[in-house]
Image (spheres, rainbow, N blue to C red):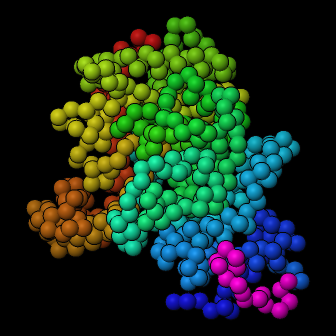
Amino acid sequence: MAVTDEVIGATTAALADYAYLTGMIDAADRVWAYNTILDEMGAEGPAPAEGWVLAEPAADDGFDLDAALAVLAEASAAHGRVEDTATGHDRAAMRVMGALMPRPSAIAARWEALRASDGPAAATDWFYRLCCDAGYVRRSAIAKNIAWKTPTRWGDLEITINLSKPEKDPRDIARAGAAKNTGEKYPACQLCIENEGYSGRGAASPMGDHPARQNLRIVPIELGGERWGFQYSPYAYFNEHSIAMSAHHRPMHIDRASLTCLLDFVDTLPHYFIGSNADLPIVGGSILSHDHFQGGAHEFPMMHAEVARAFTMPGFEDIEGAVLTWPLSVLRLRADDRARLLDACVHVIDRWRDWTDEEVGVIARTPDGTPHNTVTPVIRRVDTEGRVGGERYEAYLALRCNITSEEHPLGVFHPHAEYHHIKKENIGLIEVMGLAILPARLKTELAAVGARLRAAAQAGAAPADVLAALEADPACASHAAWAREVFARRSDELADGDVDAILHEEVGAVFGHVLEDAGVYKWDEAGRAAQQRFIDAL
């Protein structure tokens, strides 16, 4: 449904005022901004309301950026600037915001000035707020995520059902099916610094769809003596979720060079943690083709894990080593001396890459030479009490092995099949630290399961009957065996209690088991003995 000129004019003026009030433009830029927005829509009018040009903008607490951009995107589609699809509308909205934002050089200059005058935290506070105000960090979308904490033997695990990323538009899917892929793509991936300002493309493009990035701004930073970029994640999984990516499109790697980059990052931004996904399939992240890290201001459950036992390594007596009470096998190293910590981390990683212990299924290399061992590293700077931002260096090394077997073809140390109804994807950096990123399908599936369990509990049904009913319902079938077991244990609570809360607790417990599956050394006698063998070998 086409929007009227009156609505377009009012929305354009309101957005120009918003850009001024959030610091993207100066007061003298408002008329320019109004006309720029019209041009980005492919519109020649209307004129702003009488008096607006000379008026002094006042804060509008009711301004809805998403709603305003939706109006302008619809007008852009009506003027033929973009296709009338979800991705087309998104490209139109990001085009408008990209035109209003300061240029990358101005962003970089302001960042450096704030870091020099007020410190790193002031620089990230300003940059993060700008990325939110410009609509690059999708605050309203992120707010849709369902999140809770579940107490477990490992502490309180954090659970999110990720609803922030938009679903595919059927029209985009149809266009993608009709498109002929030409092979080489630009940018090479969504983490390349060449994404900054890129217009994006629709599903019909010969290069395939690519999100609009006109309002993306990347701050240049130096890590390991090389140019890297620093940006915030548009669909943040945690507080101030940021990404550092190499200027070079090269594969992920965990070695001395990458650890040096991690240490450089926390020296640049000591109030943030930084970590890397592992560099092998199954135990790595979703994008292994581009060297990158993830960081931010969040403190994860792993960082509060208790120490199971302390240890020292010969030649590294000045390094505080600790085995953490955590479902994955995590070694924490602390030191005052950065160089010494780096050497100690490299020593552990090098030893682990060649470590085989067949008693517990750890295989360093298969006969064809394929490597299977690596680590997921996380680095922070802490004070003597372990609080972030201090002078000491702290490294978490989660030992990973991506070996497969006939019983576990997706990975021995990967979520096992019984838990795939909740989590089947890789356990990457964020989940290693105790924050679950669960698929959006769970919102409707858990609601359907909960409704059936409550009805069955109130009717006094038998567990076998519950199982049959669950298996017959497409929305519940994948959860049937698990839900039946929950029903058998908690039918009295399900009849009159908070079903959503009960299922949240049970999902959190499943996530705990998923992390246990990913741990190479289990918390039984055999696992403890095997881990000690590795530590003794250090």
Residue at 84 percent across and 46 percent down: it is: 113
Q: Main secondary structure of the magenta part?
A: loop
Q: Which residue is drawn at 27% across and 50% down?
A: 420
Residue 90 found in image quarter: bottom right
Image-based side of 366 in relation to 89, left or right: left
- Can the viewer see residue 400 in this picture? yes
In the rendered image, the vertical position of residue 432 relative to residue 101, given as above or below: above
Q: Give the range drawn in magenta.
A: 38-53
Question: Height in image: 152 above or below 17?
Answer: above
Residue 146: image location, x then y, percent: 45, 62
Q: Is residue 406 left or right of residue 94?
A: left
List x then y, in percent, for residue 454: 25, 70
Q: Where is residue 334 in the image (x, y as percent from the top left)?
A: 59, 23
Q: Does residue 523 appear in the picture of this structure?
A: no
The extreme top residue here reads 315
In the visual, does 117 lie left or right of 281?
right
* Image quarter in which the C terminus is found: top left
**The magenta stretch spans residue 50:** yes
The one of 228 and 531 positioned closer to us in this rendering:
228
